Structures are given as structure tokens and as C-alpha cells.
Amino acid sequence: MKSTLATAAAKGAAIDIVSAIKRYGAFTALDDVSLHIEPGEFMTLLGPSGSGKTTTLNVVAGFTEITSGELTVGGTSMVGVPAHKRNIGVVFQHYALFPHMNVGRNVAYPLTLRGVGRAERERRVARALDMVKMADFAHRYPSELSGGQQQRVALARAIVFDPPILLMDEPLGALDKKLREWLQLEIKRIHRELGTTFVYVTHDQEEALVLSDRIAVFNHGRIEQIGTGRQLYDEPATLFVGKFIGDSTVLRGEARVSGEETAITIAGETVTTRRRIADGARPVMLLRPEKLSLARPGAGAGGRNRLSGEIAEAIYLGSGSKYEVRLRDGSTAIVRSPLEAESFAIGDAVSLCFAERDAKLLADDDQADLILT
Amino acid sequence: MPMQKHTRLILGLVCLLVAVWLVAPTLVVIPMSFNANKSLAFPPVGFSWQWYENFLTNPDWSSSFFNSLKVATLVAVLATVLGTLAAFGLDRMRSATASGILRMLLITPMVVPGVVLAIGIYAVYLDAHLVGTLGGFVLAHTILAIPFVIIAVSANLEVFDKRLETAAASCGAGRLTAFRTVTLPLILPGILSGLLFAFVTSFDEIIVALFISNPYLKTLPVQIFTSITRDADPTVAAVGTVLFLATSLVIAGGLLLGNRRRKS
Ligand SMILES: Nc1ncnc2c1ncn2[C@@H]1O[C@H](COP(=O)(O)OP(=O)(O)OP(=O)(O)O)[C@@H](O)[C@H]1O
Ligand SMILES: [Mg+2]
């Protein structure tokens, strides 16, 4: 038992949030959130603004107490344990370096508090700064560093005491795109090297896909779905998840369910799929841009689902083309076609084709549109 | 637009005039302190060090000086500790209205006319036998000095980023440790200026001091006041000169130190 604890401390700890509810007065910020995170996993909390990502992170960090529910880290309950006794590293969006200490003393701060001796402290500070490639800056003050450099120092400060868990709340939110992409790879590398459990908050779905082992998609204080990036993209559990991850086309129309088949009629044209969803819910079809293809009206393979429309926008991407197709009912479909496919110009009349198996059938949710627009 | 030569000249002259106007009353004291005669006439006649000698040797003067120093030092420490804690508490109160009302209450000694306060303090001190005691002086002056500390420290707390305390907690610092290692160093400029204000407030306070002094314990301002109302003793000018030089040195030193710290 003792040895497993020791390795867990060095390698990363599991986190279990069970039925967590957080209320601020009458407002429910976390509404029955349950989340299990494996030791050493890179878990990203993804969702729109105000969906409860930061609140969840703060609950794990100990900055906020849940109104009800259970939180365990490495099998030990953390409810009521103050933040400074949890031994969890945190990186903030606003860096939060101590302006009166230089880089070296900032990074040494957690070790000083833990009474680590001078020689050992210097060794570990040097190692942490090395890891974030900031070894040459130990004597600078935070005000003398760029945003990206400050965030790397903040990361060093959060990992220097070998916490079993590292929490990051939009750490790259204030940085430009180039720097962000580079630091994403750095964070991934550090995660691999340390084996620590990472919990990462972002509202950028691309960042989530780049970094994570698994992603928890938040909406309105609830988790809509937890899964790998691929699972979320290929098998979204809700319309919200489908629209939040990746580009998508939603087909909404008059739905008719017969046996195991669902048909949707949009402005006189009917498309079908051999799926069905629970009775009572209004079904919509969700289609990914690379699963859609375009053909001249009347041409192309028969027997597939077809909808007529008109090219509203054509964008050449180098690796292929992206089209926006205006359908008869006024809605827009997004299509990605490979280089070798026939090309179309704005205003061309086209048929939008897709295979039955590529149409995801989901329950309609008007809220999903509201949040994303 | 570059400034024209004569505009510059006029600007310089005006500045000089204002500077002279502000400093002249203080500077007049310096020649007067070397007066050979026992008079406060200006311009002075002759030259002598006798008033400085009198300041150092006459127990009336030296003891009142040391009394003031003692009282002001104790007041500075006490008011700074209490004022800083109060400012911190006010800053962290949940209810903004309660915090506002409390702040107003704590700052009243600065707003209430000194005489009113002095009469109140005198009345209480008579009963409590605090007139002419060191404790009485320290207590009364601390009441007067606390508002200055609260204002100076609050100004610093206002711009202090509280999220740094959260960051300190995530590093393993309890609330007290976080306060000591993060908050305190960052609001130190405010605390130090509060300390200075508190010291000065006590050191040159006269209204309350006049009421609660007795022959056994009086502060320098009281001594100056009684001496000047009794006879025209140029020792007053000598004391004024010493104080002027001392405060100039302290402030110049403070400015230099501040500059050096900002550069490093
Ligand atoms: N101290 C508080 N008092 C009242 N409401 C709060 C408090 N903190 C957060 N909330 C509310 O809880 C909800 C969730 O907030 P949270 O900070 O977790 O959102 P988020 O998902 O991190 O969003 P963002 O991407 O904008 O950072 C928000 O609607 C917010 O207004
Ligand atoms: Mg947030």
C-alpha cells in the first residue's frame, strides 16, 4: 500500500468528482458534475464561456468548496481540505508570478515553504527551469519577461514540487497563435516527461484536440460528454457536442420515423438514415464536412442521399477546397472536398450527397444554436 | 511644438517665485536662529551659537524634544500595526456597505475639528488620570494617526492583485504565510508611508497636546508654543532649523532609496 502511494505521488494521482453541485445563491454553476480522471491522464475541460470549467478546476484546487458532492484525489477525500494543503500545482491564465521575486525565487517559493534544503532547492529549481527552457532567466524579474516567458516560469513554479496533479486554466489564453501552438507542444512534452495528471481548461476546441487524452465537454454547468477527441468528433452524444467540436452541418426538417429508419424532409427533398433516436425527441442530422460531397445536379451516383443547393462560398485551402452550400430551406452546409474532386464556382447549382451511414442522428436542441452564435 | 525661449524664461521665473513663496517662511527661521540678541526680530543682529547650546542644555527644551521623539516613535509603530490590520480587514470585508461605513468611522479623527477631539480626550483623561502621561499621549496621538495609515495602506491594497494570494496558496502557503511573504512585501511602500505620516502627525501635533500636557510631561510643539507666548526666545528658531534639516535629510534619503530600488 505504501509503495503504491509513493509511486502515485511521483507519477500522478487519480481524480474523482462525484455528483458535484456548486451553487452561488440561486445560480447553479455546477449541476451534478461527475468526472473520473485516470492517474497520469491529460484531461481537458472544454466548453463555452460560463459553462463551469474554471469552477470545476477551482473545486479541485481547493479555491472553491462544492455545495454538495464528493471529491477525491488519489483515493483521499479532499472535501474541506484547504488549498495550501492539497499539494496540487496550478497555472493561471494571468500568470500570477510574484512581482517582488525574481524568476529563481518564484520557482523556489513552493520548495522554501516545504522546507527543502538549499542545495536540493537549487537543483530542483534548475531542473524545473530547464524543463521549460528558462534556465538563462533565473535572475530576471517577472516585469522583464514577455507573456510567454512568464507563463513558462509559472509552469516551472507549478511543477517544481512534483505535484501529482497539475491544473491549468487557459494558460495560453493571452498569447498569440504562433506562441500558443509552440507552447502546446511544450506542455505535451512536459506531460509525457513528468507523468503527472494534467487537467487543462480551454474554450478552444483545436487546442483541446491537440493536447488531450480525453476531453470533457461542459455546457451550462453540466458535462455533455467525456471522451477522446476522436470519439467526440465521430460519435457526438448531443447536438451541442457535435457542433462544438469541429465543423458541422445540421439538417433540420420534417422528421418521420418508420421502424428502424428515420427520414427528414427539407423543402420537398427527403434524406434517410437507418438509425433512430428515442421517441419524443425531434431528430436532426449532423454531417461532417469531409463526409459530404458535391455533384452537378442529375449527375453522380444514385441511391445516396441528395439535397439540392447553390454554392454560396468557395475557398481554396491548398490541400483541397471548402464550400458553403445554401440549401433550399435557407440553411448552410459546409463541405470539404479533396484536391482531385471537381471544383465549383459561387452560384453553381449543386447536389449535396452523403452516405446513410455518415449521417449522425441526434436529438434537436435549440440551446446548442444559442450558445454557439 | 517646441517652447519659445522667452516662454521658457517666464515659466522658469514663475516656478522660482512659487518655490520661494513656499519655502521662504521656513528659510527665514535659519538666520533668526543665529541671532546674537534675545529677540525674534528679522533681520537678525550679529551671530552666535547660543540658542543651539540652549536647546541642547536647557532641560525644558531637551526633555520636551525627547518626549516628542518617544511619543512619535511609539505612535508610529502602534498606528502602523493597527492601521495596516484595519485596512486589510476593510479590504477583505464581504459587504461593501459595512466596509464603507466602518472606514468612514475609522477616518473621523482626521475630519473632526482638533479642538473638539481635544476637549473630549481631556475630559476622559482627567477622570482616567492620563493627563501628562506617556501612555496618554501615545493613545491620543495614535487615534489621530491611524486614519493616515489606513488611507496609505488602503491605496496600496487597492492595486494589490489578490489573485497572487491564491497563487501562493496553490504553492502551499497558508493564509498567514501568504500574507507575510507575498501581500506584505507588495504593500510595504504604503505601510512605510503610513509609518512616516503617523510619526509626523504625532511629532507636530499641538492642539490635543496642549490640553493633555502638564509640567511633568510636555512635547516639543507645546514647549515651543509656551516659550514663544511667554518670551521671544530665539531657541525656537534653533529648534526649527534642526527639525527642518532633519526632515529634509530623511525625505532626501527616502527619495534616493526609492530611486535606487526602482532601478535595480
Ligand atoms: N463567485 C461567484 N459568484 C457568483 N457566480 C459565479 C461566481 N464564480 C462563478 N460564477 C458563475 O458560475 C458560472 C461558471 O463560471 P466559470 O468561471 O466556471 O466559467 P468558465 O467555464 O470558466 O468560463 P470562461 O471560459 O469564461 O472562463 C458563470 O456563469 C459565473 O458567472
Ligand atoms: Mg474560466
Image (spheres, helix red, strand yellow):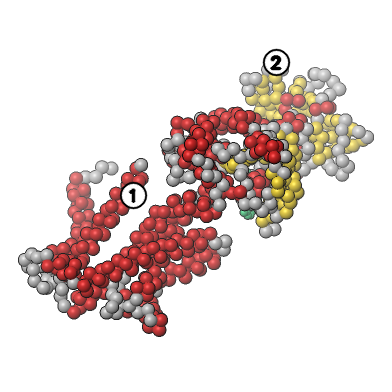
* Image: A4 above or below A315: below
In the displayed structure image, the side of residue B80 where residue B70 appears, left or right: left
Q: Position of residue A363 (x, y in %)?
A: 81, 40
Indicate the secondary structure of the residue bearing disc 2. Answer: loop
What is the chain identity of the residue bearing mark 2?
A: A
Circle 1 residue: B258
Residue at image coords 80%, 30%: A359
Residue A271, image quadrant: top right
Say what amino acid the circle numbered 1 marks: Gly
Q: Answer yes or no: is residue A367 visible.
A: no
Q: What element carries label 1?
A: helix
Circle 2 residue: A340
Q: Where is residue B117 in the image (x, y as percent from the top left)?
A: 38, 77
Q: Which residue is drawn at 66% across and 53% down?
A: A80
Question: Which residue is at the front of the view, B103 or A301?
Answer: B103
Relative to residue B161, is residue B7 drawn left or right? left
Residue A130 place in picture, x, y as percent: 51, 30
Q: Which amino acid does label 2 sit on?
A: Glu
At horizontal 70% and vertical 25% (from top left) the residue drawn is A336
- The response on whether ligand 1 sits within 8 Å of label 1 is no
> Where the N terminus of chain A falls, by quadrant?
top right
- Disc 2 to disc 1, C-alpha distance: 70 Å
Query: Dot 2 surroundings within 10 Å: few (below 14), some, or many (20 or more)?
Result: few
Residue A36 position within the rendered picture, expressed as x and y whole percent measured from the top left? 73, 41
Q: Is residue B231 above or below residue B12?
A: below
Q: Which chain carries label 1?
A: B
Q: Same subunit under labels 2 and 1?
A: no
Question: Which corner quadrant holds the C terminus of chain A?
Answer: top right
The quadrant where residue A259 appears: top right
Front tag of 2 and 1: 1
Q: In this view, does B104 lie above or below A207?
A: below
Q: Is residue B131 visible?
A: yes
